[in-house]
Amino acid sequence: MASPNKLPLITLAIIGIIVFLGFNIQKVTTVAQILIKNVQGGNKKYTDVKWQDLKNKLSSNQVSADTLNLLSRVYLKDDNEINEAIEIFNSSKDNDLRKLILQKLFYSNKKPRVKDILKNIAKAQDRQLSSIALRGLIASELIPDSANNDQWTNWQWSSEIRSLLDDAVNKNMYKLAGFSYFELLKLSEKYPDSMLTKGAIEYRNLIDGRSYFIYKDSNSFALRQPFTPVEEISKWKRFIDLYPSHPATDDAMVRIARSYEVQKDYQSAILWYYKASQAPDGDMVKTSKGRIFLLIDSIISSKEAEQMVNKSTSKVSEEILVTYLSYSKALNLVKENKLQDAYEALKNFTIIYKQKRLQTLDGEYIDSDSKFWVYIDRQVEDIKELQKIRSQPKSDKQLYEEGVFWFNRNLFTYNFLLGDYWGLYVLEKWEGDSTYTKYSITSNLIDQFWQKQEFRHELLKSIELFQSLLKDYPNSDLREKAEYSIGLNYYYLFREQWKLRSVKNAKERAVQAFDKFVKDFPKSSMADDALISIAFLEINKTNKLSVLEKLIREYPDGDRVKEAKKMLEDTRNNR
């Protein structure tokens, strides 16, 4: 699916857009991907951030999201900076700050003082930091021997690391977070009676004999057929109870979420996908986030989102999910035409979260001066404008104004927390962790998604409103503008490559709409714009030449003649 942006117009009827729709060209040509790319940190450049410029801010009682984002881009260059970082790490009670500093210290893991810290944390029962520390210790001892074999092959670990690995494979498996499948396989071979190995065997038995230690392609993650959700939920919950924090628990969580999803218990599905996204292993993060985005943005209602927020607000572990649910609730209220409720929800969201350290599912922090908040404010203003339009008595003018509104608001209901994941979760079929597999058991959900997607699509709304104007007010002075606007909407549906089930031939519809406009309003100042638009869309050389020749012949004094002559020459010369 294309990103929700209006691409640059090149030469398509720019004058027509200004005259007929009164659009702000800057908004029409905005490229949403550029906007979204900088949502989290605004347009700041972090390349020149230095530790000395930042260290005092890190010692404050409340470290801001801006400061944490800056810290993530700092490199500790000498012993003095490393020692200062260690002092802040030891004195701070801020878990997010401590995690970032430990990640910075990771790259100095051979220094004695750093190594001592890594050892102490790796031995501790810290579910957030122990795995980072253990990885740091592992990296500090990985040295190839004369045969180019390292410790994973010759097992020449220090006694301390061997002790930590023994603990991790038998008891505290969350410390294995971030270990590769190769490393987990080596551990399983070395510790055949460990909980790690027993869990891997149990996992293999539950997925009909496929090994856990293989690349997770569509075959390794395919769901057993026939698929019985109740049975799947029971089996995988039992697996999690028996092997808590096993590297396969996030896989089990996704399967549980999948089962709830098939049962249409979307609230439970979202919670389990969220658990999977936060699980130590981390290899199901992308899949889990994609499903969360699909369900909260395109499937559940504002009421269901509110119910989940009310259940989760007291749980610190679900704080990030509450953020997404709160924002999605507000956007869903817009899509449900509950504009006043949406306005209040977005205003409250800003009041609450702009003062907090807002974190995304990607682990990034949204700066207080990020463009994200600018976009939220714009959505609030758009709600007010739409309310104003709808407060008018129904008329051709009111229909036209709302049609223009929807055409010009391609980011009005966009969920800016989705970032670069927009469109990646929109699947025609989905089973387990893969797309286009042999089986599809979510056809109803996918149908539901497409139905909602088309119901709320800005360009389709715009077309519907202009068509209503033509039907209800056949003698309206705005009929000319409405007809041209319909062609323009179809043009953008084609240009932006929207995959909408109800509109599979947007280009042909645009050509038909512009052609009808020229026939209905041959004396319009926009007739030549409509014809040159058809020429841009037309692939057939003969048809293109015919349209251009008609424009030059019938509108010799129009402002598109020079452009049409150049296009005609290029077409004849196949340029």
Image (cartoon, rainbow, N blue to C red):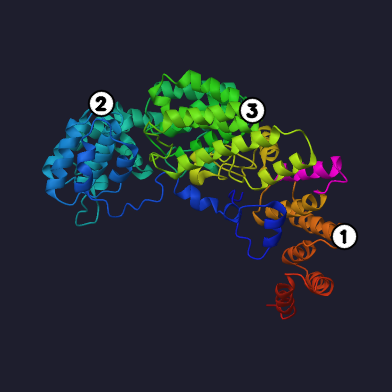
Residue 252 seen in render: no
Total marks in image: 3
Give neighbour class at mark 3: few <14, some 14-19, many 20+ (Cα, 10 Å): some
216 falls in the magenta region: no
In contact (CB < 8 Å): disc 1 and disc 3: no
Between 103 and 480, the one lying in front of the other is: 480
The stretch in magenta equals 459-478
On residue 125, the disc is 2
In contact (CB < 8 Å): disc 2 and disc 1: no
Q: Assign a secondary structure to mark 3.
A: loop
Q: Assign a secondary structure to mark 2.
A: loop
On residue 338, the disc is 3
Q: Is residue 45 placed above or below 237 in the rendered structure? A: below
Q: Quadrant of the C terminus?
A: bottom right
Q: Mainly helix, strand or loop, the magenta region?
A: helix
- Check the image and name the residue furthest to the bottom: 573
Percent x, y for residue 12? 68, 63
- The CA span between labels 3 and 2 is 48 Å
Give neighbour class at mark 2: few <14, some 14-19, many 20+ (Cα, 10 Å): few
Identified at 67% across, 52% down, the residue is: 22
Between 47 and 398, the one lying in front of the other is: 398
Identified at 15% across, 51% down, the residue is: 78
Percent x, y for residue 287? 50, 39
Q: Earlier in the sequence, mark 1 or mark 3?
A: 3
- The CA span between labels 2 and 1 is 77 Å
Identified at 28% across, 35% down, the residue is: 63
- Tell whether 185 sits left or right of 238: left
Q: Is residue 16 placed above or below 502 in the rendered structure? A: below
475 falls in the magenta region: yes
